[in-house]
Image (cartoon, grey):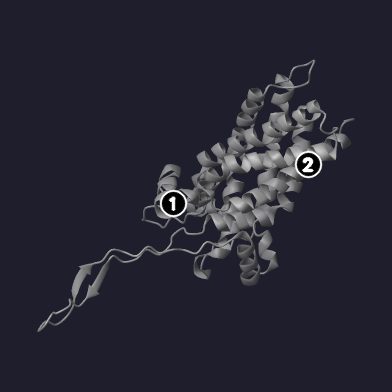
Amino acid sequence: MGVKGFVEGGVASIIAGCSTHPLDLIKVRMQLQGENAPKPNPVQNLRPALAFGQTGTTSIHVAPTPVIQPRVGPISVGVRLVQQEGVRALFSGVSATVLRQTLYSTTRMGLYDILKNKWSDREAGTMPLLRKIEAGLIAGGVGAAIGNPADVAMVRMQADGRLPVSQRRNYKSVIDAITRMAKQEGVTSLWRGSSLTVNRAMLVTASQLASYDQFKEIILEKGVMKDGLGTHVTASFAAGFVAAVVTNPVDVIKTRVMNMRVEPGKEPPYAGALDCAVKTVRAEGPMALYKGFIPTISRQGPFTVVLFVTLEQVRKLLKDF
């Protein structure tokens, strides 16, 4: 039963991940908007007014004018991406997505299934909401720790196209990305941002899996719909919305920390997750933590729907095994 849960969850996750990859790519590009924006020079060389008989200029401190970066929506980001990089760019890093889902999602789905079977009431076949959340937190944390190298590779491969040509990493595949990171930046770079990945995964799994089971139980108990496609779609879309709201701030910080370029002999742009959060809010405002929310919910909704609808169908196919 335990192995079966891992197989079912893995197959469903890979299908869901690949089918929604372009939306995830647009989300990453939007989350990086405004990062490393040019800062105005507060010192300007001006010739003082009424400076009769004086030559040269004098340095005068002038209050800097804020640089307002135009916010670009998901459709514009997608159109620009296709125009500049081609249609194939929509699937940049898809090999990393496959590996990530294989490692991360297979682990979290299988482990959640084991805990669910262990903690469910034998007679009623249900589990209290708090227990569902607890199972999600544990399963998500373990899965993220295992899948972090693929997560870092995926973020970098998705973000590569927005960099100047001279700064692009040009990874050929997820294996190439992981190999080069380990050689050039050390093995520990594969777990860069792992604390964020683990925290985010715990929140995603707890909010997504627990809320799906909870919404599904409520729909069936209230007799709103029977156990079928309509119930699965409704419960999964509601679960996707909950997961998007809960995890978007952590996702923004995770994306920026994983994507940062550390120059030899120089201080990294961010000292850690908290430093990244503080710098992001100071430079771009609190709502910067919800950058990419529209593509996040646009991706999280379909991803969760495809995930659970596929999962339910795979369970039916494998019920006799």
The amino acid type of the residue labelled 2 equals Val
Secondary structure beneath label 1: loop
Quadrant of the snapshot with the N terminus: top right
The 10 Å Cα crowd at callout 2, few under 14, some 14 to 19, many 20 or more, is many
In the displayed structure, would residue 316 be above or below residue 171? above
Would you call the spot at circle 1 few (<14 residues within 10 Å), some (14-19), or many (20 or more)? few
Mark 2 highlights which residue? 233
- Secondary structure at badge 2 equals helix
Image quadrant assignment for residue 77: bottom right
- Residue 189 drawn at (x, y percent): 50, 47
- Left or right, 308 with respect to 58, comes to right
Query: As drawn, is 302 to the left or to the right of 253?
Result: right
- Residue 298 as seen in the image, left or right of residue 159: right
Q: CA distance from mark 2 to mark 1?
A: 35 Å
Q: Amino acid at mark 1?
A: Gly
Q: Is residue 152 left or right of residue 107?
A: left
Answer above or below: position of 287 versus 117.
below
Residue where numbered disc 1 is placed? 285
Residue 54, picture quadrant: bottom left
The reply to whether residue 178 is in sight is no
Q: Quadrant location of residue 10? A: top right
Relative image position of residue 239 (x, y in whole percent): 69, 38
Q: Residue at x 52, y 46 (%)?
A: 254
Residue 63 visible (yes or no)? yes
Q: Nearer the viewer, residue 29 or 138?
A: 29
Q: Is residue 15 above or below residue 58?
A: above
Q: Residue at x 79, y 25 (%)?
A: 221
Sequence-earlier tag: 2 or 1: 2
Q: What quarter of the picture does the C terminus occupy?
A: top right
Direction bottom: furthest residue:
53
Percent position of residue 165, x then y = 53, 70
